[in-house]
Amino acid sequence: MSDERHTERTQTVTQIITPPRPEPQVSSEPSTDPQSATTTPPALAPELAPQNAAARQVRVEGLRAFYGDREQLKGIDLEFEPNQVTAIIGPSGCGKSTLVRCINRMHEEIPGARAEGRVLLDGYDVYDPDVDVVAVRRAIGMVFQRPNPFPTMSIFDNVASGLRLTGRRRDLDRKVEQALRGAGLWDEVSDRLSAPGIGLSGGQQQRLCIARSLAVDPEVILMDEPCSALDPIATLKVEELIAELKQRVTIVIVTHNMQQAARVADRTVFMLDGELVEVGPTNEIFTNPRDTRTEEYVTGKFG
Amino acid sequence: MSAVAPAAPGAQPNPFVSDTHLRRRRLRSRAMEVLALIATLIAVAVLGLVIVSVAVKGASAISFNLLFHSERPFGEAGGGIANAIVGTVILVALASAMAVPVGILVGLYTSQFAGSRGASIVRFALDILNGVPTIVTGIFIFALIVYGKAQSGWAGSIALAIIMLPIVARSAHEVLALVPTDLREASLALGVARWRTALRIIVPTAGSGLITGALLAVARVAGETAPLLLTSSIFATTVGTSPTTALASIPVRIFQLTETPSPQEHAQAWAAALLLIVFVLLLNVLARTLFGRSNKRSKATR
């Protein structure tokens, strides 16, 4: 990926998700107060012109996943549309997390775990034997259940970690600021970027983790119950963030909370016992499900 | 008195009053507690006695001469153990430079890369290596490096490194395995390669725990005598710093000083022993402090 392309896209995103705020000229010093910096209206810079977002379509074909001999996913066929939020709901142990972990090939990091089938990112199979998992994961970011900032690193270093550790050290200050703005955290932490990341509140830590995954410029973001460890207010902030982020990336979110699925998702997938039961527009799944099992689950009759 | 009213106290024997059986059980329980306490006191007292007796006998012989002068040639009075102090520092530093990086890499392998079967085989092997008597390690290095050539600081420090390696590797495994899987997955999900995740995320997170393990290993080998007797004991009376020649060391010097009939030299041996024991104690205290800090950190991530 050329550096130029990065620049353009991240600028665009900042512009999209923070429309009312005058866009400050990003200075090379991360701790500089944005107000004191020269402000440039986005329209003046040609490279800031709106662009096609880089979100990609994810297509899952005949995906089966195993833990040792146990089959956790029994053949899933599914599409995740670009620039949409797709929620995966279902009772515990139905394979929701396994499904998202198969998309960026994190599933295979668990000893004894393996997957069969295809996961296509804009038509390219991430399970192709020639594919490097590292490249796959750079394109498909992930946010975990519990906020997990790196405990030895500052706020800045946490966000920069993905770039630094994958050898992209240029223009770090600007990219870190953009990722923090993209995660709606910049205003809260811009004056203490060198403070430890684990000193933040739980909700801020989770947004820090979102900023960390945004910084490497993924095309898809997988969220595995990102709000299950957060209080309602922090949850609300993350949900608002998800709504903004989908203009830039494709989002897949696993959730136990059906209200959350109803609030954030364009489409919802209902899974049961490792199988896909129903997929459709969120309001249809919740108001007019075709399958009785879906109906029973969303109305709280089981699960 | 109506039939439903509770029985007045004393009307019936209280069923919770202990009978002979219960009383015997309580006595037995009490006896076990006292026994355990006595055993603990004995263990602590042994440590206290060792430290106190070494301190009492050694303190009087600690002097400027002892610390900063080297030994006198055979037969002359006076002199110190400066050559042994310098030698120990060099031997232990060289051994650490060899054993600590290798040990941490072994710990990384067993905790991050090896499957559970491979890891348990390696850890079993490390336990066996840890159990090898140090004189055997000394003979091994003697046969391998010294025999037919000459003793050297290198030979001594390699022997010490072999003794350190399993200690460092085991403790590294323990602290690296404590690093939450979340952090590893977070890094991998950013597209960071596995080895880079291990070196840049997992090792720093376990940092002070790793240093603790290394310090304890240093404390352990600083007092090793047997392997050095075979590999680095025929040393000059002057301060030597080149590991290509045999280097003096505090433990070997203590042994030599006790072999002589001279009371002054016996006193020097006690002083050297005091020096060694203080050094080891300090290392242990430092290691504990650091480990407390690393525990706090891994709790903070929870």
Image: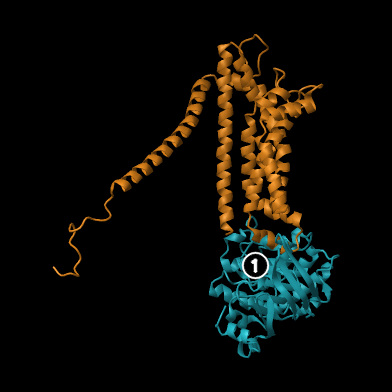
Residue A103: x, y in percent? 74, 71
Residue at 38%, 44% (x, y): give it.
B29
Vertical order, A191 against A42 (above or below): above
In the rendered view, does A107 fall on the left or right side of B55? right
Identify the residue shown where x is 61% and y is 15%.
B259
- Residue nearest the viewer, comparing B5 with B182: B5
Quadrant for the N terminus of chain B, please: bottom left
Q: Colour of chain A?
A: cyan
Which residue is denoted by mark 1 in the rendering? A144
Which residue is drawn at the image coordinates 76% and 66% (left, top)? A137
Report x, y in % for residue B26: 34, 45
Q: Can residue B232 be seen in this snapshot?
A: no
User: Drawn colour of chain B?
Assistant: orange
Give the residue type at disc 1: Phe
Instruction: Find residue A287 and report its image quarter.
Output: bottom right
Quarter of the picture containing the C terminus of chain B is bottom right
| Relative height, residue A15 to residue B228 (above, below) | below
Q: Residue furthest bottom?
A: A288
